[in-house]
Image (cartoon, rainbow, N blue to C red):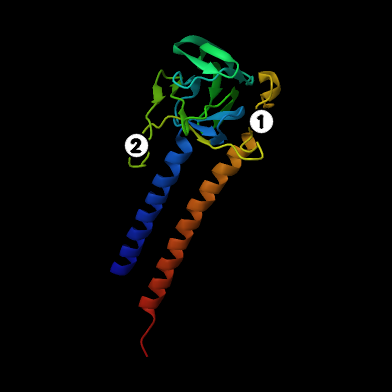
Amino acid sequence: MSFVRRAATVLAATTALTAALALPALAHVTIQPGTAEQGSFSKVAFRVPNERDDASTTKVEVSFPTDHPLAFVTVKPVPGWKVEVTEGKLPQPVTTEYGPLEEAVTKVVWSGGEIKPGEFQEFEVSMGQLPTDVDQLVFPTKQTYSGGEVVDWAQAPKADGSEPEHPAPLLKLVPASSAGGGHGAAPVSASPAAAAPSVTPVAAAGASDTTARVLGGAGLVVGVIGVAVGVLGLRRRPTA
């Protein structure tokens, strides 16, 4: 019986560890896809899951970088949500291939809608031209709940590579491919309107991503159960 108790304890600890590793990754506000090509125009979605069981998300506020501003930002309408795009004067003008840039989008706010417990919503943005001299862009985001709680997803990645408690959505930038495509980006052309890609729904990708995480965690738990049962069978086999 003592062996059975020990096996049960190991199984419970493993299950708890699996849940602890999987759930935070599902709960964070993230950018999908998480990478784009430097110098491109790209479409991304800010994926916002509801972390609370007793409140709905009613407002999402995304801050855009001003040290590496984006000259062209457009948003896709979300049914039931009102969107407000704020432009502001930059700390200092930025030179682009289209001329000096003195103002840019600094914030986008979605409000008036509802993300219920157990649900998520994706807010899509087409933007560019992405910078070529950095390897990532950070988009601090505030998530407001119906009860008045505001969760600030604004922490930068830690130096040791570990994830902070409330990480800011992060877009990694990779060198442009020789073919001029990839990651949903369109090649830069003579005019911004021609370069900007069309915006298409990405909800299906979110569903498959969540399913993969859940199945992976379930597989680990089943494997642990199999090991425990096998060891228990060996312990109880009578000796010749």
Res. 34 visible in picture: no
Q: With respect to residue 142, does 164 lie above or below?
A: below
Depth check, front residue: 213 or 41 = 41
Q: Which residue is drawn at 60% across and 43% down?
A: 208
Q: Position of residue 70 (x, y in %)?
A: 54, 20
Q: Are marks 2 and 1 in contact (CB under 8 Å)?
A: no
Res. 14 visible in picture: yes
Q: Residue at x 34, y 66 (%)?
A: 4
Q: Mark 2 points at which residue?
A: 158
Q: Position of residue 175 (x, y in %)?
A: 55, 37
* Horizontal side, residue 57 vs residue 43: left or right: left
The answer to which image quadrant residue 225 occupies is: bottom left
Depth check, front residue: 114 or 136 = 136
For the residue marked with disc 2, what is the amino acid?
Answer: Lys
Callout 2: 10 Å neighbours few (<14), some, many (20+)? few
* Horizontal side, residue 152 vs residue 125: left or right: left
Q: Position of residue 65 (x, y in %)?
A: 46, 21
* Horizontal side, residue 124 vs residue 237: left or right: right
Depth check, front residue: 39 or 84 = 39
Q: Name the residue under label 1.
A: 187
Quadrant where the C terminus sits is bottom left
Q: With respect to residue 89, does 65 lie above or below?
A: below
Q: Distance between the residues labelled 2 and 1?
A: 33 Å
Depth check, front residue: 34 or 91 = 91
